[in-house]
Image (cartoon, rainbow, N blue to C red):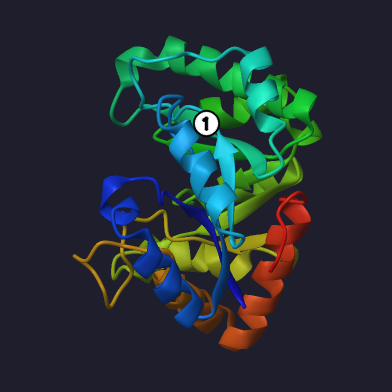
Amino acid sequence: MLVDSHCHLDFPELHSNIDAVTARMADAGVGHALCVAVNMEDFPRVRDLAERFDQLSASVGVHPDHEGGEEPDVARLVALAAHPKVVAIGETGLDYYRHPERAEAQLARFRAHIRAAREAGKPLIVHTRSASEDTLGVMREENAQVAGGVMHCFTETWEVAEAAMEMGFYISFSGIVTFRNATELREVARRVPAERLLVETDSPYLAPVPLRGRTNEPAFVRHVAEEVARVRGIGIEALAGLTTANFFRLFRDARAV
């Protein structure tokens, strides 16, 4: 069995055809997926999907890129995380690539999410882009290691991965690891210890080779896993087994079906 550790099934591209999406997921041997929230306004749809499908879990949080809408405080995040199908806080983090002018607001949001994860006892889902130094710095300052979590859709250097793992974080690879120009990232995927490794789609975006240009979906996580297995010199079944075990160890409130 494979697990898609990060997807956005509430997004219109997938939600409008959710029964077919989950059927293809099952046909591909993907037994579980974590549907990740990016704002408060759409969180009820994320939660409802997890309630409807046994093979889905949910998170609660506000993406660093998101503007407008509710800005949840720690208490609000903790309260929503108490739902039995909500297994994580996030996605959260810092993204200076698109909005460097909003760094201070992003930093405050990130700190609130880390504090909520510590209080709720739920792991963090961390997004970082063009902001790795500040991301790691805030994680250290806010004792993110108490909550633990995952650096999702990882595209950074080995040194960033190593620093995150020193705080107990897992490293998750998306379809980007299959891209032709991702040589350095494949080397990171080769070096990450087996017990810290996850795979994901980040669907509906970043469809892996050989499906570039298509709407991504959880069934396609098999292509990510196959590439990670290839660079590590192991079989796909071995890779599936270890990443699935890692997922349920990290997201301890998620339930296999």
- Counting from the top left corner in percent of width and height, residue 136 is at 60, 31
Going by the image, does 200 lie left or right of 244? Answer: left
Residue identifier under label 1: 92
Q: From this view, report whether residue 63 is shown above or below residue 6.
A: above
Residue placed farthest to the front in the image?
Answer: 52
Q: Residue flagged by tag 1: what amino acid is it?
A: Thr
Front one among 146 and 29: 29
Residue placed farthest to the left in the image?
Answer: 213
Question: In the picture, residue 238 is in which quadrant?
Answer: bottom right
Q: From this view, report whether residue 226 is shown above or below residue 185.
A: below
Question: Badge 1, how many Cα within 10 Å: few under 14, some, many 20+?
Answer: many
Residue sitting at 71 percent across and 54 percent down?
254
- Counting from the top left corner in percent of width and height, residue 46 is at 48, 41
Q: In which quarter of the image is the N terminus?
A: bottom right
- Counting from the top left corner in percent of width and height, residue 241 is at 69, 78
Residue sitting at 78 percent across and 57 percent down?
249
